[in-house]
Image (spheres, rainbow, N blue to C red):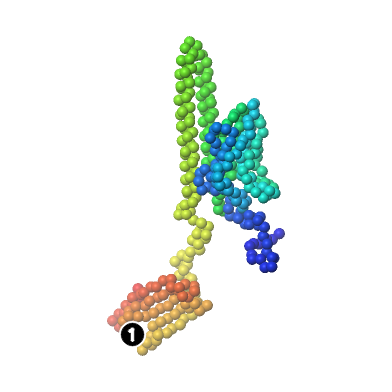
Amino acid sequence: MQKSSFFNSVNGDRRYKAEDYANYFSKFITNGVFPNVAFNLQVVTDGTDMNVKLKAGAAWINGYMYQNTLDLVIPIDVADGLLNRIDRIVIQLNFAERLIQAVVKKGEFASTPVAIPLQRDADIYELGIADVLVSQGVTSILQSAITDLRLNNTFCGLVNSLLQADTTAIFNQYQSWFEQTSEDHEQEFQTWFESVKGQLSGDVAGNLANRITEVETDLGVVTSRVTEAETDLTQISEDLIAHKADGVSHITGQERTDWNAKETPDGARKKVEQTDFKVYKSGKDANGIFTTIEYRRQDDTLAVKSVLSGGTSPLYTTRTLTYYGLNGTTVEKTRPRTLTYDADGILISEV
């Protein structure tokens, strides 16, 4: 089917649906969250209960707009006593209901749980915002249990025009570091536990207190490193956003087209030489010299005007060349030239 848009309606013969406009905007605005600030639509928690908050922000899905104007409290279902699960928080576009809203996709209970895949079909299209790990027996959600998916283009990504910046690498690098650090410190704990088992005799309380102090010290180091990593990730995200918004470092597609269309000096010279001008002379003086010469294009618009002045005929001292735009009236450039003659009155230079 051939389609075209958009045109004024005459007696109701041009009517458009919302999906026509959505389809139009989706051609040059990519899906994702708007990167105005780093916490736009971020999922956070204060760690006191089973609720999380979706920060204020906006998203774009297939030409449709979503906006959350205030922090939105999202309840997470209670944990299981034996098994874990991962709940995925998504921004869901529902075509049948004609709305976009934040939805919790509750995961299946398992010892090694996985999140429910995103639904992206003719009925529903989802952006993954965050995964929430609901461990067995927990009564509150900690920030460490939340995996931010916004910078992962597979699940969400940032809104861009025409081209989408791939922030997945940043996300994967941070996730890999976090998992590796967790594994390293789990191994350190096991090593410590093996070493302390044989020391729980004699002054048990004293030995145990010393070991606890060592663990607390190590935990403080780990917490500091995690905080530094989160700060670095936030700075990377803000730097990326600022870099993308830098209109000086980047040129638009139109600017690139305009630049490529610029003529070289050699090309401009050849074009002038190949132009078939109409020539009109006027201002004939007593010596038969025309003081004004006009060069007009084939559509009769004025291209160049040459005017002699200064001195006494026939030894005029100045020739002024005026160049006009395509409309024949806008002056683009004026260039005066000094005329020099030899002792016999012959023109020898024009500079």
Residue at coordinates 31% horizontally, 81% vertically from top-left?
311
Q: Quadrant of residue 83?
A: top right
Q: Is residue 173 above or below residue 31?
A: above
Outermost residue toward the top in this view = 202
Q: Is residue 24 above or below residue 47?
A: below
Q: Is residue 35 left or right of residue 136?
A: left
Residue at coordinates 48% horizontally, 75% vertically from top-left?
328
Examine the rendering and report whether any part of residue 164 can be seen. no
Residue nearest the viewer, comparing 242 with 343 = 242
Q: Is residue 132 left or right of residue 333?
A: right
How far from the left and from the top, in percent, is residue 132? 59, 35
Residue at coordinates 50% horizontally, 20% vertically from top-left?
192
Residue at coordinates 48% horizontally, 15% vertically from top-left?
205
Outermost residue toward the bottom in this view = 286
Task: Say what amino acid the circle numbered 1 marks.
Answer: Ser
How far from the left and from the top, in percent, is residue 231? 47, 38
How far from the left and from the top, in percent, is residue 42? 55, 41
How far from the left and from the top, in percent, is residue 188? 51, 24
Q: Quadrant of residue 101?
A: top right
Element marked by disc 1: loop
Quadrant location of the C terminus in the rendered image: bottom left
According to the picture, the residue beneath numbered tag 1 turns out to be 313
Q: Residues within 10 Å of mark 1 (few under 14, many from 20)?
A: some
Q: Is residue 348 above or below residue 200?
A: below
Q: Is residue 308 left or right of residue 251?
A: left
Residue nearest the viewer, comparing 312 with 11 = 11
